[in-house]
Amino acid sequence: MSLSETDETITYKIILIGDSSVGKTCLFKKLTTGVYSDKNISTIGIDRKSISLKIKVVENGVELEKTFVIQIWDTAGQERFRSITKGYFQDSQGLLLLYDITNKDTFDNLDKWISSVKDSLGDDDKEKDKYIIILLGNKLDLAVGDDRRVTTEEAMKKCEECDIIWGGECSAKDFTVEELTNKFEAYTKEIFQKIGCNVQRDSTATKAVKNDKKKCAC
């Protein structure tokens, strides 16, 4: 296969979801600003930033380099904001579901998050083709010895049981921006393989986000 270039730009919306304190905002800020900080307060509502990636993908048997604009949405994990978060699932192409490797409760709560997504977006075959859920374990830097409460094998088994994609483990603190970007490139390829360029625009959420007061949290 020969590599071709294309001027086409594809925009995907990836939403970070999961319990409060699993590290969504730390990951969000490190990836979009290059800065890590663990001194954050709880996210209220939604925050959003975009990154641009040039990725080689295969389309119709031809390897192409396409430009992707990835809208990354950081969401509140607290129960009282769950209904707000559910409203932003619409028109998303990827849902990145995070848990804390050192906190078993955040892993046990994954079923609630997956059910919430399926209740909002539908879980029949036609609806499932519009989005993918990727599971990511965070705080790998803290998962030393007995401090690790969720094994990789448990997480991979959960993905098989729930029919979601295993995105691996990471550390928003210790991973470089390049390493985190590489992960998002892999997620983008997964989305492209499933839905290609078939993307609907999300005007409702775009307008609503302007009205949210945004604060950040791990």
Image (cartoon, rainbow, N blue to C red):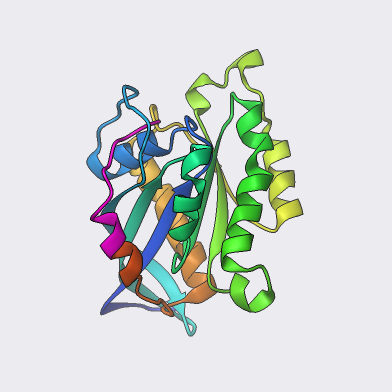
Residue 89, image x and y in percent? 48, 60
Q: Is residue 216 magenta?
A: yes
Residue 169 visible in this rendered orientation of the protein: no
**Residue in the image at 63% along x and 61% along y:** 118
Residue 69 horizontal side relative to residue 103, left or right: left
> Residue drawn 60% across and 33% down?
106
Picture layout, residue 166 above or below residue 89: above
Identify the residue at horizontal 42%, vertical 38% (top origin).
Answer: 24
**Which is more toward the observer, 202 or 196?**
202
Q: Which quadrant of the figure contains the C terminus?
A: top left
Depth check: 125 or 79 in front? 79
Q: Quadrant of the N terminus?
A: bottom left
Asked if the magenta segment contains residue 20, the reply would be: no
One can see residue 8 in this view: yes
Residue 143 on image: x %, y %: 57, 22
Magenta part mainly helix, strand or loop? loop
Q: Which residues are magenta?
A: 207-218
Q: Residue furthest top?
A: 146
Percent coordinates x, y for residue 210 in the rendering: 23, 55
Q: Identify the residue at image location x=64%, y=35%.
A: 107
- Residues 96 and 211: in front is 211
Instruction: Reply above or below: 14 against 33.
Output: below
Task: State which quadrant residue 8 falls in.
Answer: bottom left
Residue 71 horizontal side relative to residue 167, left or right: left
In the rendered image, the vertical position of residue 200 relative to residue 204, given as above or below: below
